[in-house]
Image (tube, rainbow, N blue to C red):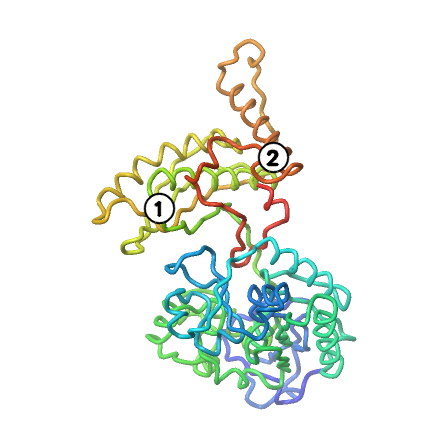
Amino acid sequence: MFYNAPQTKSYPAGDTIPAVAGERWRTATSATLPATTRDGLTLPPRPLRWLFLDLNSYFASVEQQLNPALRGKPILVAPVDSETTVAIAASVEAKRFGIKTGTPVWEARRLCRNIIVTPARHEKYVEFHDAIIAEVWKHLPVTKVCSIDEVACRLLDNENSIEAVTALAHRIKAGIRANIGACMTSSIGVAPNRLLAKLASDMMKPDGLVILPAETLPHRLYDLPLRDIAGIGAKMERRLAQEGINDIRQLCERRPRDAGNAWGGTNGDRLWYLLHGVDLPEKPTQSRTIGHSHVLSPSKRGLESVRLTARRLALKAASRLRRKGHYCRLLMLHGKFEDDKSNWRASVKLPVTQDSFVILAALDGLFPQLAAAGRKRVGGFQLRQVGVTLCEIEPVAGEQESLFAHLDANDPLARETRGLALSRAMDSINEKFGRHAVSVGPLHGGRIDRVGTKIAFGRIPELHEFHE
């Protein structure tokens, strides 16, 4: 059985039809299709299949929930106490003044004289995140945690009528307010696929609920800018404009193959089907890097402070690498200078390792390059941000031990075996007794910033990481 005409779509001959998640394409006789169909194919059933929850102004809302004095006031969450840093979150009240993520603190003060700047507390954000996920699970299974403030849930057939999903969304919202906190509002989008459900969650903020049934697609999207679609940034927007595509309507009016050609690959073809409500299986992805970066306090931007901070970041990354059971083959040191915010990076190949001492030795070998780059700056060496990334990671397949360790203490493999054992011992001690219970090299004395665990887009730290 097929949907009525408003839910059908004809395909020009020659277009490639992708597979559909959980559904099969159906070939129909000409009598069951509109006359305009030329190849006997129509869109598959497109029921409401995804609920996407986006927590409103998440970091700022957590701060307001924890501190009643901040409620109803414009607040900005900043990574460090500095006028030159930028907001990593802004409350709903602050957004009314035009303050948003990425707004410099000094500009936020110009836009809103009463803005309250509060330092980020990432461990609290992870605690609230875990509690919110547990609350959502009380109402329906969580299919994918997309970020610290976003979650996607696949709907069953008995949950996806407009009436049922509306009631379900309101129960989730009420549960979060009652059991997590009154400040924790969310916007929910419901649609046939996850991309559209996320788009729907952005269409009404704060505390919104938007449902996109198949019969409203794709024309319900025509008023949205192209940049609202995940995967379309400034570069892709310019490319599409060169192909005569300036809005979602023009993209959807192309044939799937033509949309793919305009995109420059298969993703345009895939995006066309997604915008029409087809629920395509996701492409598998695998992380190939583990890293940390840190915006330095103004007084900690000299070479020695940067070096010590980078070593601390490297130790955190190495600890995560071991906990995941991976090795790495490449180390990258990167940063942004204070004068022009330009990016600098250098890398070095590693033996296949997860040993903190091997990683630190390689990191120290990169610092002469960073020092030389800093000396060329007009104002001298002043690095605003530093980062360390372990690259080319792969799962541990089996550990090799030295045959000669008991005979020669200086055997290279024996030294690495001892270093890895010591690295793992440090992991255990820090997890039991707290961060910095034991480490390598100086961590105090005012020469190093506090390098706490941070929340990156698309990655939620485990609570273990706050002990690293």
Residue at 70% from the left image edge and 66% from the top image edge: 180
**Furthest residue toward top:** 407
Residue at 56% from the left image edge and 22% from the top image edge: 418
- Say which quadrant the C terminus sits in: top right
408 over 150 or under it: above or below: above
In which quarter of the view is residue 170 placed?
bottom right
Q: Nearer the viewer, residue 143 or 174?
A: 174
Q: Where residue 427 is drawn, which disc sits there? A: 2
In which quarter of the view is residue 42 placed?
bottom right
Q: Earlier in the sequence, mark 2 or mark 1?
A: 1
| Residue 95 x %, y % | 48, 75
Q: Nearer the viewer, residue 79 or 327?
A: 79
Helix, strand or loop under label 1: loop
Hey, what amino acid is under mark 2? Asp
Q: Where residue 301 is drawn, which disc sits there? A: 1
- Say which quadrant the N terminus sits in: bottom right
| Residue 4 x %, y % | 66, 88
In which quarter of the view is residue 47 placed?
bottom right
Is residue 172 shown left or right of residue 236?
A: right
| Residue 104 x %, y % | 39, 65
Residue at 61% from the left image edge and 36% from the top image edge: 430
Helix, strand or loop under label 2: helix
